[in-house]
Image (cartoon, helix red, strand yellow):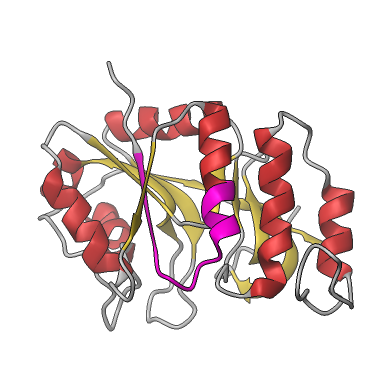
């Protein structure tokens, strides 16, 4: 059976190096990636459009432009969960919304269209109660649909609360280094972090956390980047 493509969307404010870096990781992992540019289109509207293109028996996979699986095994696990009727996603918490529970976030998310239909074909747009695609997890709990969430294990610059379960932030790694999400990729200060993680994966090298931390902690711009975040400390969630 043909493996499903991963769908991602970006606006014009995303650096070209982020777009190319993500593609290099997916090429290395031999995963089909569809990158679409829809400037100023909301994330939820775009996701609705992708779902509308699919048949009921197809697996739908969303990924943020500044995220990727670190291994092909992680991608295959997400597909397996989806084909078994579950919703797979990276654990997320919307601090600016009314929700009180974690949800399977579309930074990397997989589900069958038939599962979405079972939940009443919900609109994936952000609302007053839920962030983009968060409604899927809300309805899944109500309808006893399994949620499989890969939790953050560490991040380079902690920034937000993950509900009552810890923190996440710039340069977050999920599971046993299964997925990576930069966050705030529109900001040039974090561009080099993404570049270096992507280069290591695309080259088949081990993850170099010492190097990523040096970049994150650098108080001054390096020759490879116009700006860097101010000095921060590394936090582990374990």
What residue do we see at 29% from left, 62% from top? Answer: 138
- In this rendering, position of residue 127 left or right of residue 69: left
Nearest the camera: 95 or 191?
191
What residue do we see at 33% from left, 25% from top? Answer: 3
Q: Is residue 51 above or below residue 37?
A: above
- In this rendering, position of residue 84 left or right of residue 211: left
What residue do we see at 31% from left, 62% from top? Answer: 133
Residue 211 horizontal/vertical position (percent): 87, 52
Q: Is residue 99 above or below residue 194?
A: below
Q: Is residue 143 above or below residue 178?
A: below
Taking the view exactly as shown, the residue that stands out farthest to the top is 1
Residue 140 horizontal/vertical position (percent): 26, 52
Is there any visible trace of residue 213 in the rendered image?
yes
Toward which corner of the image does residue 49 lie, by quadrant? bottom left
- In this rendering, position of residue 131 left or right of residue 56: right
Toward which corner of the image does residue 134 lie, by quadrant? bottom left
Q: Is residue 116 above or below residue 169?
A: above
Q: How many marks?
A: 0
- In this rendering, position of residue 117 left or right of residue 107: left
Residue 192 magenta: no
Q: From the image, which quarter does the N terminus lie in?
A: top left
Nearest the camera: 149 or 8?
8
Residue 10 horizontal/vertical position (percent): 40, 63
Residue 31 horizontal/vertical position (percent): 45, 30
What residue do we see at 75% from left, 74% from top? Answer: 226
Is there any visible trace of residue 167 in the rendered image?
no
The stretch in magenta equals: 6-21
């Amino acid at each position: 059976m043909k493996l499903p493509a991963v769908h991602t969307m970006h606006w014009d404010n995303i650096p070209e190096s982020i777009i190319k870096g993500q593609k290099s990781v997916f090429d290395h992992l031999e995963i089909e990636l569809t990158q679409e540019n829809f400037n100023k289109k909301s994330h939820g509207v775009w996701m609705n459009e992708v779902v509308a293109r699919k048949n009921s028996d197809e697996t739908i996979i969303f990924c943020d432009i500044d995220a990727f699986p670190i291994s092909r095994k992680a991608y295959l696990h997400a597909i397996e969960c989806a084909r078994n009727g579950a919703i797979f996603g990276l654990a997320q918490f919307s601090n600016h919304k009314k929700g009180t529970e974690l949800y399977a976030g579309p930074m990397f998310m997989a589900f069958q269209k038939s599962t979405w239909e079972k939940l009443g074909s919900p609109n994936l747009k952000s609302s007053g109660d839920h962030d983009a695609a968060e409604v899927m997890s809300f309805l899944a709990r109500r309808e006893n649909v399994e949620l499989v969430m890969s939790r953050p294990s560490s991040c380079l610059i902690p920034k937000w609360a993950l509900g009552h379960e810890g923190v996440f932030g710039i340069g977050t790694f999920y599971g046993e280094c299964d997925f990576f999400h930069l966050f705030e990729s529109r900001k040039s200060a974090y561009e080099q972090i993404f570049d270096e993680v992507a280069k290591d994966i695309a080259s088949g090298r081990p993850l170099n956390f010492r190097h990523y931390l040096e970049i994150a902690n650098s108080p001054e711009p390096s020759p490879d980047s116009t700006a860097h975040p101010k000095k921060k400390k590394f936090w582990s969630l374990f």
